[in-house]
Every structure is written in structure tokens, then in C-alpha cells.
Image (tube, rainbow, N blue to C red):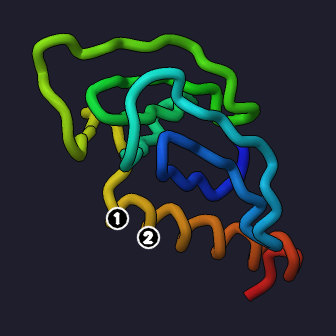
């Protein structure tokens, strides 16, 4: 998956380059409005906008599917998956990545 920073607001989602803030791609929800909730899980970027849920390809912003969530109402959406990463998991992964990079650049010597 791409190393982008995803932002969502005003019916829009954008992928930014975290090194310089450049917009890599942007997408506008065909339906819904306002606040956009985001969740990345297993290579899919989920975006919720005012009662609609969209699945996007996080590499290029192409829409994979949508669901109008008929009967669920509107407002700010909370999303979660069984596999979504917790803050603890992110910290552990960052520590493992840093240790691997240190070992690789130092030739494995301590």
C-alpha cells in the first residue's frame, strides 16, 4: 500500500505526499456532503460522507464500490474493522521498522 497521508473534508478525499504535502490524487463523493470519516484496512480506503460509504483504492483514489446505507441516517460516521490497526500496533510496527532499518544500515552489528 502507498505511504500517503489521507485527508477527508467537504465531500472530498485527498492523498498527500507526507514528505512535502503535495496532493497525489483527489476524489469527490458523488453523493453525501460535509464531514468525511476515513478508515484504511487491508489495502482499502473507506470513506463515509453524510450517510454514504465508499471503498476507494488508496493508491489512486478510484472508487471500488459504494453503499447508500439506506435507513441509517446522516451525520459523522464511526468506522472500525476487526483487523484495523490500533495505536499500540502502530507503535510496535514503527519500533520494529526502526530496528530493522538500524540493523540494515549498520550491517547488523550492535
What is the quadrant of the N terminus in the image? top right
Q: Are marks 2 and 1 in contact (CB under 8 Å)?
A: yes
Say left or right for 92 vs 17.
left
The answer to whether residue 2 of the structure is visible from this angle is: yes
**Front one among 102 and 87:** 87
- Kindly identify which numbered label has been placed on residue 87: 1
Q: Residues under labels 2 and 1: Cα distance? A: 6 Å
The answer to whether residue 78 of the structure is visible from this angle is: no
Disc 1 residue crowd, few under 14, some 14–19, many 20+, Cα 10 Å: few
Q: Residue at x 48, y 52 (%)?
A: 9
Q: Position of residue 12 (x, y in %)?
A: 56, 42
Q: Position of residue 65 (x, y in %)?
A: 50, 11
Asked where in the image residue 109 lies, by quadrant, the reply is bottom right
93 to 79, vertically: above or below: below
- Kindly identify which numbered label has been placed on residue 91: 2
Q: Residue at x 12, y 22 (%)?
A: 72
Looking at the image, the residue that sits furthest to the bottom is 110
Amino acid at each position: 500500500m502507498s505511504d500517503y497521508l489521507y485527508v477527508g473534508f467537504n465531500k472530498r478525499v485527498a492523498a498527500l505526499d507526507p514528505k512535502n504535502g503535495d496532493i497525489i490524487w483527489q476524489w469527490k463523493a458523488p453523493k453525501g456532503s460535509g464531514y468525511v470519516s476515513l478508515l484504511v484496512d487491508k489495502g482499502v480506503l473507506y470513506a463515509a460522507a453524510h450517510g454514504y460509504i465508499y471503498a476507494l483504492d488508496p493508491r489512486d483514489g478510484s472508487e471500488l464500490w459504494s453503499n447508500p446505507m439506506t435507513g441509517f441516517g446522516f451525520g459523522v460516521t464511526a468506522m472500525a474493522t476487526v483487523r484495523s490497526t490500533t495505536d499500540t500496533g502502530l507503535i510496535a510496527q514503527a519500533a520494529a521498522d526502526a530496528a530493522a532499518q538500524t540493523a540494515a544500515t549498520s550491517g547488523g552489528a550492535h
